[in-house]
Image (cartoon, grey):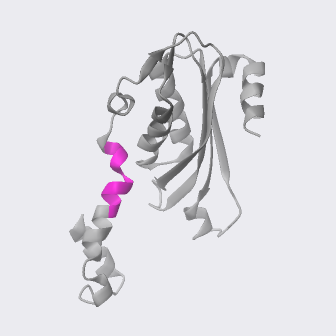
């Protein structure tokens, strides 16, 4: 990866021996490995058996989970928040695990639409919930820094599974709680 970054920098017309660039290929490779560390994680490892018995059957909502990802089309960041909810059926997931699931999928080359679906399906798979809802809102540098250069545009995506899809009242309750 360092070699590839060195080639990219040289193709830009820069001198890799310039003081500020001497270690840049190594730093860039290290940063890219960090930004894409989700490829080295799996759902079981992230959840780490943090499922706990509970007779709660009311909606659990965690909102404003910060997320950072890289758009798979331009390798530019998109930054935003995920809001997740589920209706437990006999067990609840450790609170931090919801954020870790968002991070695992976010730390891959990604498009927001797929990430929203992956997070929802992962929570459903792990919890066996009666329903799962995920809303992600993010700003995309590929739209802000290049192309149409629109600084105030944000994208919202949602995925509703189970009772969140089938029951309009459940969906409405979730969306109302986000306001």
- Dominant secondary structure of the residues highlighted in magenta in the image: helix
- Foreground of the two, 91 or 109: 91
Question: Residue 47 location in percent, x, y?
Answer: 39, 29
Q: Is residue 38 magenta?
A: yes
Apparent side of residue 109 relative to residue 120 in the rendered image (left or right) = left
Q: Is residue 84 at least partly visible in the picture?
A: yes
Which of the 4 image quarters holds residue 14? bottom left
Q: Is residue 28 left or right of residue 136?
A: left
Left or right of residue 174, residue 108 in this image: left
Q: Quadrant of the C terminus?
A: top right
Q: Where's residue 139, x and y in %?
A: 62, 57
Q: Nearer the viewer, residue 61 or 13?
A: 61
**Of the pair 8 and 57, the residue shown nearer to us:** 57
In the rendered view, does 156 fall on the left or right side of 72?
Answer: right
Q: Which residue is pictured at 32% across the width and 75% down the height?
A: 8
Tell me residue 58's x, y (percent).
66, 17
Q: Is residue 29 above or below residue 89?
A: below
Which quadrant, please, contains the N terminus? bottom left
Provide the residue span drawn in magenta.
31-39
Residue under the image location 67 percent in, 45 percent down: 156
Residue 164 horizontal/vertical position (percent): 67, 22
**Would residue 168 be counted in the magenta stretch?**
no
Q: Residue at x 21, y 70 (%)?
A: 3
Q: Is residue 134 visible?
A: no
């Amino acid at each position: 990866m360092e070699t590839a970054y060195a080639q990219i920098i040289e193709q830009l017309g820069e001198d890799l021996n310039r003081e500020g660039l001497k270690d840049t290929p190594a730093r860039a490779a290290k940063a890219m490995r960090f930004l894409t560390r989700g490829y080295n994680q799996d759902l079981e490892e992230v959840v780490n058996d943090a499922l706990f018995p509970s007779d709660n059957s009311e909606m659990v909502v965690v909102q404003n989970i910060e997320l950072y990802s890289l758009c798979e089309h331009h390798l530019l960041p998109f930054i935003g928040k995920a809001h997740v909810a589920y209706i437990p059926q006999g067990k609840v997931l450790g609170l931090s695990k919801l954020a870790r699931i968002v991070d695992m999928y976010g730390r891959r080359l990604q498009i927001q639409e797929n990430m929203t679906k992956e997070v929802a399906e992962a929570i459903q798979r792990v919890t066996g919930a009666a329903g799962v809802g995920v809303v992600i809102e993010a700003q995309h540098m590929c739209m802000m820094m290049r192309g149409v250069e629109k600084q105030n545009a944000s994208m919202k995506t949602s995925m509703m599974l189970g009772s969140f899809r089938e029951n309009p009242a459940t969906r409405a309750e979730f969306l109302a709680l986000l306001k």
